[in-house]
Structures are given as structure tokens and as C-alpha cells.
Amino acid sequence: MAESDNEVLEASGDGAQSSMDLLIADCFQIIASVGVAKSSYIGAVQLAKEGKFDEAAQSIADGDQAFKEGHDVHLSLLQRTAAGESIPFTLILLHAEDQMAAAETFRVVANDFIDVHKELAELKGKLS
């Protein structure tokens, strides 16, 4: 934990400790969920490369479900902030948001690669 996080915990007492623990748990839930999503998107590209387009589509769908789980946790943090609750900014929260952005970006790239592999397979089919 960063030194500033420790200072916040020490200054705030036990209530802040459990609040910080919940925030950290939420952050790790985001990181884990979007990590699964990103892995699914990477796997989808590999499946498309092998010509397994139905399986690639399912892998994208699985990734989307995992991403939604992380997004829902993140949304709850945003809603709590909008309601006036002070959510401490920590390095782990920054990392969670960075991982979300990376997974979302990779989803776009994965779909583009899948489309390219489909077109390539169609062109190869026409040449055979």
C-alpha cells in the first residue's frame, strides 16, 4: 500500500480501514474480471487465425460478460462518488481503471483482427 494510503488509514480510524479494504477488494475484482476479458479477446484472435470463427465469436461474448462484471463494480464506485461519498484515489484504483481501458481497447482491436482473418479466409477460398 502506498504511504499516502497508510496515512489516510491511520488518520481515519477503523471505519476507514474497512472502507479502504472494500475499495481494494473492488479494485481487485475489476482487475480480475477485465483480465479474464482481455484473455478471452486474445484467445478469440487466435481462434480466428485458425479459422474457428464461431468459437472466436463465443470467446468475444465470454470476454464481454467478464468485462461487464468489472464494469459493474467500477460503475458502483462512480455512483458512490456521484452520491457524495469520498472514494480515495489510490494506485490500485488507477491500475484497475488502466486495465479496464486496455481490455476495452483490445476488444476493438480483436474484432478488427477477426474481421481481417475472415476476409483472408474468404480470399483463400476463392483462390483454391
Image (tube, rainbow, N blue to C red):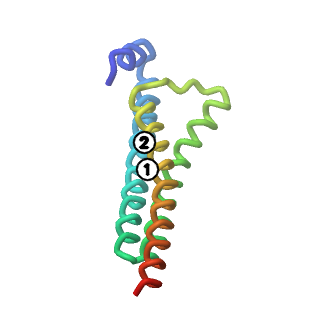
The residue nearer to you, when weighing 28 against 58, is: 58
Q: Earlier in the sequence, mark 1 or mark 2?
A: 1
Measured as percent of width and height from the top left, residue 50 is found at: 34, 74
In the figure, residue 51 lies in which quadrant? bottom left
Q: Residues within 10 Å of mark 2 (few under 14, many from 20)?
A: some
The residue nearer to you, when weighing 56 against 17, is: 56
Residue placed under numbered mark 1 in the picture: 34
Q: Amino acid at mark 2?
A: Gln
Measured as percent of width and height from the top left, residue 57 is found at: 48, 71
Residue placed under numbered mark 2 in the picture: 99
At horizontal 45% and vertical 41% (from top left) the residue drawn is 26
Q: Are marks 1 and 2 in contact (CB under 8 Å)?
A: yes
In the figure, residue 30 lies in which quadrant? top left
The vertical placement of 96 against 67, above or below, is above
Real-space CA distance between mark 1 and mark 2, rounded to the nearest whole angstrom: 7 Å
Q: Residues within 10 Å of mark 1 (few under 14, many from 20)?
A: many
Q: Secondary structure at mark 2?
A: helix
At horizontal 45% and vertical 51% (from top left) the residue drawn is 106
Measured as percent of width and height from the top left, residue 123 is found at: 47, 77
Q: Secondary structure at mark 1?
A: helix
Q: Amino acid at mark 1?
A: Val
